[in-house]
Image: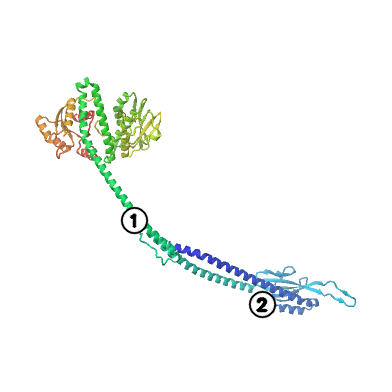
Amino acid sequence: MNRNLRTRILGLALLPVTLVAVLLTTVFLLHSIDSIEQGLRTRGTAISRQLAALSEFGIFSGQRAALGALSASALGIDPDVRGAAIVDPGGAILARGGELNPAHWPSLARIEGRHINADVLLFVEPVVLRRLPVDDIYGGVESPTTEAKVIGYVMLELSLREVSARVKRLIAIGFVIAALGAALGGWLAFRIARAITRPLLAANEVVARIAGGDLAARMEVNSAGPLRSLSIGINHMAARIGVSQEDLRSRVAEATAGLQREKDAAERATMAKSHFLAAASHDLRQPLHALGLFVSALAQSDTANREPALVAHIRSATDTLQNLLDSILDVSRLDSGNVVPRIAPLALGPVLERIQRDLSLIAEHKGLRLKVRATDLWVSSDAEMVQRILLNLVGNALRYTRSGGVLVSCRRRGDQVLVEVWDTGAGIPERARAEIFEEYMQLENPERDRAKGLGLGLAICRRLADLLSAPIGVRSRPGRGSVFWIRLPLQQPAAELAHLPSAMESTDDLARLGGTVLVVDSDPLVRAGMETAITGWGARVVVAGGREQAMIRCGESRTIPDMAICNLRLPGKLSGIDLARELCALYPGIGILLISADVSEATQAAARAAGFPLLKQPIAAGRLRAALHTLLA
């Protein structure tokens, strides 16, 4: 860059000097060459006229010898005279001297310098016979005019060789002068460029150092020359930038410290919220689980026959509380980043059949048609997450559809499967289609009626879809209905994995239980609820608050339990998984079911590694009975 700048400045300074030198030299050469040619023409004209005047008497008297001598004498008048000749009016040569080119002579007429070839200039001057006026002194008569007659021509050729040589010498001299002028101008331009570029380059270097963060960089003021004011200004600028940057650094440090304090406070608040939700997840799920079991037992008692409305209201309140707690804790769990999808081949057909079976009663109660198109497509995804998304979408469609029905369909789109939930509801305005996936957003529930949902279903769907990297969205026409859709990656059919019954699976067709069930849980309400519900289903129940009590109770009853329900959290250092392993060693063939309010990924991974099924508290009575029926069978 330094060399480029110096070259540009030198070129800008040298260009006008060189142009002036070339122009002046050109003018001088043109003027000198014109003067030389004009002098040659003047001399040629003078010589030819002089010879014409001297040749008049020789032509008139016919003295050719005199004419020859006159022609020869012309060669000595001027060194540029190449040859001379005297001809008669017909063009016949009367006398000649030197080298001539008669073949190139034009017609006879006065010519004052004409090129007949590259090196010869021709002059032609007529020889005129003049008669002088004579006075008749005797008769007193005077001739009024003078008569003139052309009696010949003088032909003069001048050589241009000497002139060409002089022109070449002048051109050489002109080039030398131009070169000297350009050299002098270049030297001056170099001095000027160096005087300017040095401080400019120094300024550029200082500015680059300042830009790189070296705020102590300064220019030498004394060596700046004509740009001294520039160096002073740059030094002042650097000083002001240093002060400004220090001030900015202090402000940034203060702002960063403030942000760090706010970040620490937010992290502490988040940690406190996480601790609170963890405590709520365990402390609230335990009594809620027991309450659900008591309600299930109450529904099968004589009281349900006497007070069916009261039992239905209690069950409705319990279900609403359970759904509320599950939704809030699910949103918190998804936001924490602890949920990791378990991707595996999944057949969509059984999932859709289960959704139709679970929600058909709700559709019939509202007078709606729920139709699910059968499909044999498979996807690669998390079975539990996909089922949860579709349950939420179909349940949401049934909740906001007043007439008509809901259709669930699957279509293949390239290497993906498009699952759509169509409804004939009121539709969604375009302005609200992006907002409906936010928490607590409900378009038709300004009074916050819990019967219309909590506004968390679609928010959970979006979070689950993000975890699955599955696009989710909605199309809608106000007044005509909406279509919620999700795209899942296509998968080739694979062997379907065994799974426990759905949380909402009907238990009406299940037979009464048999055998002995050991329930180990530290919460007395949970133990009481389990005992009441399982006893009502036909099985014998042995309850214990921990490992030692479980061993004592089994010993006292002198019975071998057919299966055991163990909470993961037990008093002491022993966990539910450890107790389950000990029971399997003591009673080979015993069935194990783990329950826990903590459903983190680590907990689920530990249960999977031990090979025991895990259910999340609170457990719906129907699912618990179905699980017991499966394990006891």
Report helix, strand or loop for mark 1: helix
In the image, 418: left or right of 610?
A: right
Residue 253 x, y percent position in the rendering: 31, 52
In the image, 167: left or right of 108?
A: left
| Residue identifier under label 2 | 79
Q: Is residue 451 visible?
A: yes
Which label sits in the foreground, 2 or 1? 1
Q: Using a 10 Å C-alpha cutoff, classify the residue at mark 1 as few (fewer than 14 neighbours), some (14 to 19) or many (20 or more).
A: few
Residue 355 figure quarter: top left
Q: Quadrant of the N terminus?
A: bottom left
Front-most of residues 602 and 491: 602
Front-most of residues 462 and 304: 304
Front-most of residues 353 and 406: 406
Q: Is residue 613 visible?
A: no
**Three-letter amino acid code of the residue under disc 1:** Glu
Residue 59 x, y percent position in the rendering: 78, 76
Callouts 2 and 1 close, C-beta under 8 Å:
no
How far is disc 2 from disc 1 in space, using C-alphas?
A: 90 Å
| Residue identifier under label 1 | 246
How many marks overall?
2
Say whether disc 2 or disc 1 marks the residue closer to the N-terminus: 2
Q: Residue at x 20, y 28 (%)?
A: 293
Residue 291 x, y percent position in the rendering: 21, 29
Q: Residue at x 27, y 35 (%)?
A: 328
**Three-letter amino acid code of the residue under disc 2:** Pro
Residue 197, numbered label? none
Residue 128 x, y percent position in the rendering: 78, 73
Q: Using a 10 Å C-alpha cutoff, classify the residue at mark 2 as few (fewer than 14 neighbours), some (14 to 19) or many (20 or more).
A: few
